[in-house]
């Protein structure tokens, strides 16, 4: 089983993933927790490139997209496919829906570009995706409290509104795979809602 977790900044993805990871472990399941961009040493290096703020040179949107997929290709081959092949449960903090929401809906890149990459470089779709949804302001306040903002977190509210509508579009298109969780609830309530879908 391959489960991904999506949402805008500060919606509580990390907390939910940790709790589900512990839940599966307690059940004696073999479970792997990983994230994108990242998840392998090389992909984590690409993540640093993607998140760091460089005032001397603006990263182009195409470069951003391709770096995301370079990291993803490495992650799929080195982590996701071997784990699924060994019968493990894979919990992944972000996956391809983030590319649609951030790079297409947010940055305005064409869907054709994304489609080309998904068709050629993504051999594995999640079985289930949790979309943690909350108003942008709420998440941004939480993100700010965490400390220095990364290159994405420095974007404006309007950017994140577009990202959020990108997730909403995927949810409308594929409600079977993507389940929306109301992230304005307490951590316990979000966890309980996620469990109800899993069961
Ligand atoms: P992450 O660390 O999950 O952010 P958060 O602090 O919200 O948990 O992800 C890092 C950033 O990468 C996040 O701002 C979203 C962005 N991202 C994309 O733009 N496209 C992608 O395909 C992925 C996987 C992430």
Image (cartoon, helix red, strand yellow):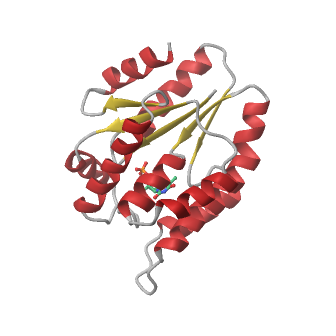
Q: From this viewpoint, is residue 144 visible? A: no
Q: Is residue 118 above or below residue 190?
A: below
Instruction: Tell me which residue sits at (68%, 54%) in the image.
Output: 121
State the residue at coordinates (40%, 67%): 151
Q: Is residue 159 shown above or below 53? A: above
Residue 80 in sight from this viewpoint: yes
Q: Residue at x 36, y 50 (%)?
A: 166
The residue lying toward the viewer, choosing from 100 and 64, is: 100
Of the pair 185 and 102, the residue shown nearer to us: 102
Residue at the farthest bottom position: 56
For the image, the number of numbered tags is 0
* Residue 59 vertical position relative to residue 20 in the rendered view, above or below: below
Please tell me in which quadrant of the rendered image residue 66 appears.
bottom right
Q: Quadrant of the N terminus?
A: top right
Question: Where does residue 78 sit, x and y in percent of width and height?
Answer: 76, 48
Counting from the top left corner in percent of width and height, residue 112 is at 52, 61
**Would residue 48 be found to the left or right of residue 9 on screen?**
right
Residue 99 at x, y percent in the picture: 49, 55
Tell which of 130 and 79 is nearer to you. Answer: 130
Q: Residue at x 34, y 54 (%)?
A: 163
């Amino acid at each position: 089983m391959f489960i991904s977790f999506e949402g805008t900044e500060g919606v509580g993805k990390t907390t939910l993933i940790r709790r589900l990871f512990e839940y599966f472990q307690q059940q004696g399941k073999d479970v792997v927790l990983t994230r994108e961009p990242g998840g392998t040493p090389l992909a984590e290096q690409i993540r640093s490139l993607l998140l760091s703020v460089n005032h001397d040179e603006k990263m182009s949107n195409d470069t951003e997209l391709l770096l995301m997929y370079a990291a993803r290709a490495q992650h799929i081959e080195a982590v996701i496919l071997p784990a699924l092949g060994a019968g493990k449960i894979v919990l992944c903090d972000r996956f391809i829906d983030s590319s649609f929401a951030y790079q297409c809906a947010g940055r305005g890149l064409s869907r054709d570009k994304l489609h080309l990459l998904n068709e050629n470089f993504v051999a594995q779709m999640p079985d289930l995706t949790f979309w943690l949804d909350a108003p942008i302001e709420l998440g941004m306040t939480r993100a700010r409290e965490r400390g220095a903002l990364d290159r994405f977190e420095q974007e404006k509210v309007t950017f994140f509104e577009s990202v959020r509508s990108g997730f909403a579009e995927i949810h409308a298109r594929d409600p079977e795979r993507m389940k929306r969780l109301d992230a304005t609830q307490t951590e316990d309530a979000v966890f309980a809602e996620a469990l109800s879908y899993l069961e």
